[in-house]
Image (cartoon, grey):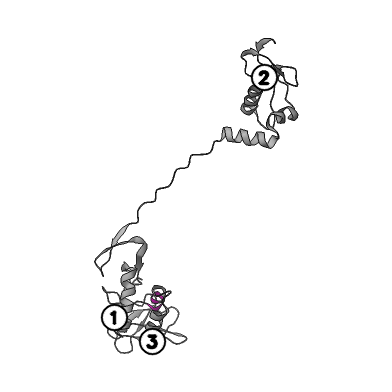
């Protein structure tokens, strides 16, 4: 068995195999590594004579061209090591009702802009229904009533609490078709028809103007 320069790895070794072009190489592993290293667009050329190796020769070491492509892809694009993501702990906020710290996930913003922890707002609704005091279901800072849409969301899944709240809502707070209910700072509620292009409506019992959009007291230069 002759010892000569392998046409694939270019090292002095006993030559046991021959490529289809006639050039000799040392062993099967040498052929596999050379094909994996030089395979591109389904073509490999002999480094000694530059003739292309046929697909039959390539697949004899890998079974199918797809297997060869998979091994080439795994060799040239190794999978990235899995790095578990460490989630930042939720931000802690301060509730002005219970005076305790609470997770940002429990934050609830009222239409007036003040934020509290959700359990405290749920307790506010329950305390108001237990005392039959509709006007106590409000923001503790500016005393603005919690809107019924937000009460419905806060009591989701608690049908009895939502029913108790609805039984507590005074009739004057419910607007009929074509009207909207507004809360005057001096009088609990009044209903008025809204007109396009008019920024505010006046309370029928006093000259206080209420914004049509945010339903807060309206004054010159008021912005929602």
> Pointer 1: what residue?
136
Q: What distance separates the C-alpha of mark 2 from that of mark 1?
A: 89 Å
User: Quick one: label 3, few (<14), some, or many (20+) residues within 10 Å?
Assistant: few
> Pointer 3: what residue?
167
- Number of the label disc, if any, that sits on residue 85: none
Above or below, comparing residue 76 to residue 107 in the picture: above
| Numbered disc 1: secondary structure | helix
- x and y percentages locating residue 98 in the rendered image: 25, 69
The total number of labels drawn is: 3
Depth check: give the residue in front, 153 or 189. Answer: 153
Answer whether residue 189 is visible to the viewer in this image. yes
Q: Give the quarter of the figure containing the C terminus.
A: bottom left
Residue at the limit of the structure toward the front, as seen here: 1
Depth check: give the residue in front, 160 or 223. Answer: 160
> Pointer 2: what residue?
47
Depth check: give the residue in front, 63 or 38. Answer: 63
* Residue 149: in magenta span: yes
């Amino acid at each position: 068995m002759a010892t000569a320069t392998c046409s694939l790895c270019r090292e002095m070794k006993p030559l046991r195999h021959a490529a289809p072009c006639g050039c000799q190489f040392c062993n099967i592993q040498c052929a596999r590594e050379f094909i994996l290293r030089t395979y591109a667009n389904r073509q490999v050329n002999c480094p000694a004579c530059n003739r292309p190796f046929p697909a039959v020769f390539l697949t004899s070491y890998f079974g199918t061209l797809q297997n060869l492509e998979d091994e080439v892809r795994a060799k040239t694009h190794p999978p990235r090591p899995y790095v578990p993501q460490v989630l930042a702990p939720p931000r802690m906020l301060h509730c002005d009702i219970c005076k305790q710290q609470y997770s940002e996930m429990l934050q609830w913003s009222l239409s007036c802009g003040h934020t509290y922890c959700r359990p405290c707002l749920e307790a506010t609704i329950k305390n108001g229904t237990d005392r039959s005091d509709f006007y106590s279901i409000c923001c503790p800072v500016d005393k603005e009533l919690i809107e019924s849409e937000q009460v419905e969301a806060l009591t989701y899944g608690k049908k009895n609490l939502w029913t108790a709240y609805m039984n507590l809502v005074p009739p004057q707070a419910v607007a009929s078709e074509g009207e909207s209910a507004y809360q005057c700072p001096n009088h609990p509620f009044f209903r008025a028809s809204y007109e396009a292009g008019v920024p505010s409506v006046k309370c029928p019992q006093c000259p206080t103007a209420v914004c049509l959009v945010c339903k807060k007291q309206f004054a010159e230069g008021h912005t929602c």
